[in-house]
Amino acid sequence: MLDASGLVRVEALPENNTLPDPFTFFNGNKVQSKSDWYVRAEEIRKLYQYYMYGVMPDPSHEKVSYSIEGNVMTISISKGDKQVSFPVSFHVPDPKKVPMPEYGYPVIIAFGWFTQTQYANDRGYAVMTINSYHIAADNLTRTGVFYELYPYGQTWQEQTGALMAWAWSMSKVIDALENGAKNELHVNPEYSIVTGVSRWGKAAAVAGAFDQRIKVTVPACSGAGGMAAFRYVSEGKTYDYSALGIESPYTMSANEPLGSLQSTAERHWFNDNFLKFKSVNYLPFDQHLLAALCADPARYLFITGSYLYEDWTNPPAMWLTYLAAKRVFDFLDIDNHIAIRLHKEGHMVTDEDLVYLLDYCDHHFYGKEVQSNLQDLKRSLYLEPANFDPAFAVYLD
């Protein structure tokens, strides 16, 4: 059980209008070594659980089993005298068409829909999909299989928001695979790729931050509460998107504000403490720290988003998150373990995004030569002089 030692009430937090330093502990001490960073990472996980997403349950109290029928795996979780289950759809490559790697196919685990299953299978990647509404309702009812096991309570240790609950379900899929399903499905959970779009992109980011077994975390169009830095506002700023075929200057409309996340439409994604914040400047973290929780020599982070008509998700703020988080990846000498790709338009993982992602994975998993220029995954139009913001300069070499 987590405790609140060393933490302070929301009302007592100091104001800070800059991105918190990943290398400064909550008590002011500095990260001096790589081993220090991993201690700091655990502190950041604690901060997110206490102030924002709620608690990720201790898996040692759970027993996970599975059954398979057709293209559906049913995962059962028991805790004490309670038991729940939820279905996961899966599609595995045809070994007659795509030779199976020694330890099984890498597996994409996605929330909701995943429209490019056939392409992924043809590239040698299995696909599993979770219906998040089985796990936690997307409303204030706090219902679903997660809340049957972990009812939402009055204390912060008893509170888990829907984003964390959905992230928990990703971990249960990996548990089931590790418990034997990998052999029946011929997939390799050590090469797991988690993804989702929009609110499920936020949940994918949380899953990758809290389950270190996840190989590649791919939050798509995740915006505020996901990969967009809270403290960076692009609303009202003008951008030169001529490289995208947009002749006129593009003025950014509204970004999603804190008040939207705290509204009755979205507040169930978080715990009660998060609702107490009156300004993002009192948050003891920003989303570059969530991204940095994926920094590990064995793991990768691949951020996706859209330049056009996605103003609500604040793409320049996602670029800032990438830059600020990359400092941690650089510190750990794993700068190629973080990537970003902003496509032209569309609230989705585009076909071209998926090509880049699977090329990125093929390269890092198997050392393959790929057609995509992976250097593209370190750039954005926000590096162009017309779009450059001095706020970015702090994080550039």
Image: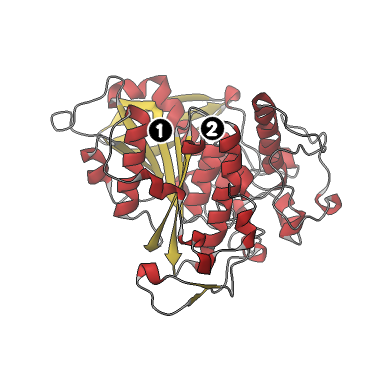
Residue 158 position, x and y percent, is: 69, 39
| Image: 389 above or below 185 | below
Question: Looking at the rendered structure, which numbered label has been put on residue 7?
Answer: none
Q: Is residue 360 above or below residue 60?
A: below
Name the amino acid type tagged 1: Ser
The relative height of residue 18 versus residue 297 in the rendered view (above or below) is below
View extreme (right): residue? 12
Residue in the image at 52% along x and 27% along y: 78
* Quadrant assignment, res 320: bottom right
Single out the residue that lies furthest toward the left. Answer: 96
In the picture of the structure, the residue carrying the numbered disc 2 is: 211
Q: Which numbered dot is residue 192? A: 1
**Residue 364 coordinates in the image, percent (x, y):** 38, 32
In the rendered image, is residue 176 in sight? Answer: yes
Residue 1: image x %, image y %?
71, 29
User: Relative to 228, is 217 above or below?
Assistant: above
Q: Amino acid at mark 2?
A: Asp
Asked whether 368 or 175 is in front, the reply is 368
What's the CA distance linking mark 2 and mark 1?
11 Å
